[in-house]
Image (cartoon, helix red, strand yellow):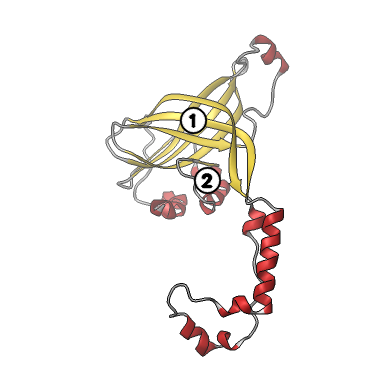
Amino acid sequence: MKTLLLLPLLVIVVALPQTPNTDSSPVNVVAFKYAPARHVVENPETSAIVPPASAMIPANKNFSRNVRANDPAGVRDPNADTLDGRSAAIEKSVAESRSPKSKEIAGYSYRVKVKNAGKGDIEILFWEYQFVDPSSAEKVGRHQFLCGVDIRAGKDKELEGFSAVPPVSVVDAGTLMKNEKNPFQEKVVINRVEFTDGTIWQRPDWSLKEVKASYERALKQPWLPGMCKGL
């Protein structure tokens, strides 16, 4: 997504002329829920297979290689007929047969329906799903997500994030005994909103530096259609 390539520049937002607005959130949370889910991801072991270097045959010399660059589509690569080429093809075929191209990961799906209550169109949204212990008001679970979106002013949109981490990291036995069915309070918090006109809204007690490492890592991963990235 083109706009996401500009996101690293926002890390130095203090140096930018547009300072984030910290008034009331321009995004309303309409509904939210979470549930166990399984996601299919590509197996990195098969995608990382790299063939060995090609043998130095006449077709690989500078002049011949430059001529081949202009060959029409469908012309067979002469490297495929060399010993190295045939060996690489066999090794790749064997590796792919032993390792599945994709695998399922068990985790949880976090869904939220939001409405753009502001006057501008939203293109990037940071939000988190929280679990709170009602007896102590302590946050016992927190799952943050980054979404590339297109939410026009006055419109709403459903977003989904996936995490393999359990909803709650620490469970208090006393809390469970008081309310076995739903021991924790759930809520969704909007952390940061970026509009198409370059303006930004950000929650006063949240900082982009807080998720800098996971944010940079998320940008390097492929985007799944309709999915937000976990931070």
Graded by Cα atoms within 10 Å as few (under 14), some (14 to 19) or many (20 or more), the crowding at tag 1 reads many
Residue position for label 1: 111
The vertical placement of 113 against 229, above or below, is above
> Which residue occupies 69% across, 26% down?
170
Residue closest to the eye, 192 or 167: 167
What number is the disc on residue 209?
2
Residue 151, given in percent of the width and then of the height, sits at: 34, 38
Q: Is residue 204 visible?
A: no
* Label 2 secondary element: helix
Above or below, comparing residue 65 to residue 172 in the picture: below
Residue farthest to the left, as pictured:
119
- In the picture, the quarter occupied by the C terminus is top right
Real-space Cα separation, disc 2 to disc 1, in angstroms:
25 Å
* Image coordinates for residue 5, horizontal then vertical, percent: 43, 55
Is 4 situated left or right of 176 in this image? left
Residue in front for this viewpoint, 5 or 207: 5
Q: Is residue 211 above or below residue 47?
A: above
Callout 2 amino acid? Lys
Using the rendered view, name the quadrant where residue 166 is placed.
top right
Bin the neighbour count of mark 2 within 10 Å (Cα to Cα): few under 14, some 14-19, many 20 and up. Answer: few
Nearer the N terminus, badge 2 or badge 1? 1
Q: Nearer the viewer, residue 212 or 92?
A: 92
Q: Residue at x 64, y 40 (%)?
A: 105
Q: Residue at x 64, y 66 (%)?
A: 50
Q: Residue at x 72, y 16 (%)?
A: 173
